[in-house]
Image (spheres, grey):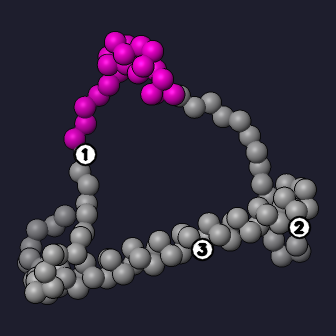
Amino acid sequence: MARGRQLSFKRINATADRLMELEDQKKDIEAEVKALRGALCDALDERETDAIETGRYLIERESYTRLQFDAKRFREDAPTIYELYCVERRVSQFHVHAAHSEDV
């Protein structure tokens, strides 16, 4: 990030307010997307098919099998080998929380 003029608390608050507003909208949108996908999957189930052609959309559901590594089981069954492959990495997380006081 470029260093230069620092944002004022007023500007930081406005930016954080907008971020929180968008995060709330994102949750609502993701919930609606999940519900709509569910409705389309229900339509596939009702018709006992994996594809519906509406003339405007092709709605498809594809089922497949994939391999997945069970790290928890591997750790339990072979802890010594598991430890050999563990790598420590520095990570950071970004959080914005409402302050405890509205006076901020």
For mark 1, give the secondary structure.
Answer: loop
Pick whichever of labels 1 and 3 is earlier in the sequence.
Answer: 3
In the displayed structure, 103 sits above or below 43; it is: below
> What is the CA distance from the residue labelled 3 to the residue labelled 2?
23 Å
Query: At label 3, which amino acid type do we have?
Result: Glu
> What is the CA distance from the residue labelled 1 to the residue labelled 2?
46 Å
Q: Residue at x 23, y 51 (%)?
A: 92
Give the side of residue 6 with respect to residue 50, left or right: left
Q: Which mark is residue 22?
A: none
Q: Residue at x 22, y 41 (%)?
A: 90
Residue wearing tag 3: 32
Give the side of residue 61 with respect to residue 81, left or right: right
In the displayed structure, 67 sits above or below 26; it is: above
Tell me where residue 81 appears, x and y as whole percent: 37, 13
Give the crowd class for mark 2: few <14, some 14-19, many >=20 residues within 10 Å. Answer: few
Q: Residue at x 90, y 56 (%)?
A: 48
Tell me where residue 79 appears, x and y as whole percent: 36, 16
Which stretch is magenta?
70-90
Residue wearing tag 1: 91
Whether tag 1 and tag 3 are in contact, CB under 8 A, the answer is no
Number of marks in the rendered image: 3
Query: At label 2, which amino acid type do we have?
Result: Glu
For mark 3, give the secondary structure.
Answer: helix
Any magenta on residue 4?
Answer: no
Pick whichever of labels 1 and 2 is earlier in the sequence.
Answer: 2
> What is the CA distance from the residue labelled 1 to the residue labelled 3?
32 Å
Q: Which mark is residue 53?
A: 2
Quarter of the view holding residue 104: bottom left
Closest to the camera, between mark 3 and mark 2, is 3
